[in-house]
Amino acid sequence: MNSSNNFFKDLNETQRKAVTEIEGPCLVAAGAGSGKTKVLTTRLAHIINQKKAWPNQVLCVTFTNKAAKEMQNRVLKLINGKPNSVPWLGTFHSTSVKFLRRHAEALDLKSNFTILDTDDQKKLLRKICKAENIDAKKISPSFIIAIIDKWKNKGQLPEDVSLKKSDNLEKLVLGVYKIYQNKIRDLNSCDFGDLILYCVKLFENHSDIRELYRNNFKYILVDEYQDTNFIQNKWLNLLVNDNKNICCVGDDDQSIYSWRGAEIKNFLDFDKVYKNCKIFKLEQNYRSTKNILDTASSLIGHNNDRVEKKLWSSGEKGELVKLNCYQTGKDEAERVCDIIERELKKKYSLNNVSILVRAIHQTREFEERFLKVGLGYRVIGGIKFYERAEIKDAVSYLRIVNQKFDDLALERVIGVPKRGVGESTISQLYLFGNRDKICLEDAILKMIEINQLKPKIKISLSQLLNMIHKWRKDSKKMKHYDLLKMILDESGYSKMIKDKKDLENENRLENLKELLRAMQDYDSLQAFLEHVALATSIDQEWEGEKINLMTMHAAKGLEFEVVFLPGWEEGLFPHQKSLEESGDFALEEERRLAYVGITRAKREAFISFAMKRAYHGDWNETLPSRFINEISEKSVEKNQPTLKEMPEDFEFNQDQNFETNEEYRSPGWARLKKKLIK
């Protein structure tokens, strides 16, 4: 085994204390890039190395299989161990499966129970909805799964759920939940939400089993504790024994998943639940330059609900964080591209350059620019703009209006919204068209004329073709983007999107609005369709390096040499919808998200906002995000706009008053001048 000197040689003083003081409850508040994984794995190895416990007497849980595997490899290296000498180390879910396999009978399950994946859940829910006469087109299985998962994360089986009288939608889902839960029990199955919930029920209802594990686990270690939800925290508390040797590691300043059920209060209240708790603050950052850290620290310092810590580095001061103002979102994308091409490509690999946005629809203008200049890019955790389903649907409507021989476009249009036309009818239409060497549209007209279609299908397709013929006439006298608005409304597509209860609905609507915005950059429908065709057919799998495009949520846990943070405007970031739904709580989470974004950067960071941005097809003047005012001026280089129409004395880092929502909702130019100009 490693000697003590080698064991601790790479640890700073605070890290060493967090590793060696192993008795009693302990909270490690680890700032971004401060070596939390190193502390957790070294602490675990130290416990085994000092023979405080055998490997199977230590429980270590994390959130992802990737993190668990990384920790396993590090621990094995530290203790010179073999794979079978690793402690109970895994995710909450994988560890729960071990418990449940051993004690399935106590829960009226068989030990060979099946774990359902999301596809299995959706298939089962579709069958239940059909049997209960629930329209699965309006309430998607993924939406039902999300609500059921929300209840399970709160520890609620169907009999535990209580609802307000007015909540008719959740009443409907609760009825489905009861049937669903009985059905998966009949199938000797569990879904992912059951794995932790059933363990909690097992430990609550069978004290002998609970005590078996409480006595066995002498030490419990938890990674990313700020991301735990109610049921995960309860799971942990039930396993902690009288010695209370539980160590939780995480960063409350990076708690950005409340929408998934994560509860930051688990982290903030840890020392209240576990008295005489030791708290270690890891504040030395090994990732970023001093200026990047000062920028992030000054911003997050405005949050009230946090364990106070200030990141610092013994490394170089580095480049000042660049704070840029642009006239429009398009200008922002063009200038960011220019900076990458002219300045950064000489110093860094494009793989180490990332653009982090608040909302996925923001990637569109950057994608357009990169395509135009031939810079390779990848969208991480999302689909490229013109490949998104709702964009393809809308463009298909435009394609068939533009020319009648586009059979593939018409086939797609027939299917969205659903018109009761199945694959067999489509095949029949194609066979008829191929025989007479005519396009799909003419085949439909001919088969309607000779009455070879079923009455309902005949009516449905007649109505569609009548609309297409009308839109073709309209296209000759109206703007192409106004035409698309009308098509989406008259076809029923907009209603389909708005009516469907689905988790992705808001993103789809935002993407369609962004498409309407994009169309205004082109003189005609033909020009726009040519652009889309080139954008989607161009070889986008460039060999070699690619710029990374992703949301700030998707960037957590990653790091890059250079990070761009565009779109820092009120309403976009912090996001208006979040503030309206959750007020100050949401504001603090949005600020944590900004902190995560900044601390992804190792060498250089660029923050920017636009003076005007298009919303719903209209140009609106915008206010810079309040977060810009909260950043320390000492670590930032402000690049004032050089636009003719901007006032000479314009400065964008002045005091703003955000006491009421009305102050920053849909700001106009008059309000902008009042707020920003001395």
Image (cartoon, rainbow, N blue to C red):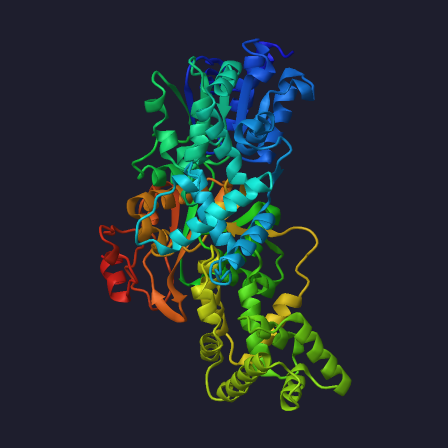
* Residue 595 visible in the picture: no
| Drawn side of residue 669 relative to residue 260, left or right | left
| Drawn side of residue 360 relative to residue 301, left or right | right
| Drawn side of residue 602 relative to residue 589, left or right | right
Q: Position of residue 415 (x, y in %)?
A: 58, 71
| Drawn side of residue 105 relative to residue 496, left or right | right
Q: Position of residue 175 (x, y in %)?
A: 44, 50
Q: Position of residue 375 (x, y in %)?
A: 61, 58
Q: Residue furthest right?
A: 435
Q: Quadrant where the C terminus lies? A: bottom left
Q: Position of residue 484 (x, y in %)?
A: 48, 76
Give whichever of 452, 247 is nearer the camera: 452
Q: Is residue 39 above or below residue 251?
A: above
Q: Is residue 205 above or below residue 531?
A: above
Q: Quadrant where the N terminus lies? A: top right
Q: Residue at x 52, y 23 (%)?
A: 40
Q: Residue at x 35, y 57 (%)?
A: 571
Q: Residue at x 56, y 79 (%)?
A: 456
Give whichever of 343, 116 is nearer the camera: 116
* Residue 501 visible in the picture: yes
Q: Is residue 323 above or below residue 529?
A: above
Instruction: Report how many numbered discs are placed on residues in the image.
Output: 0
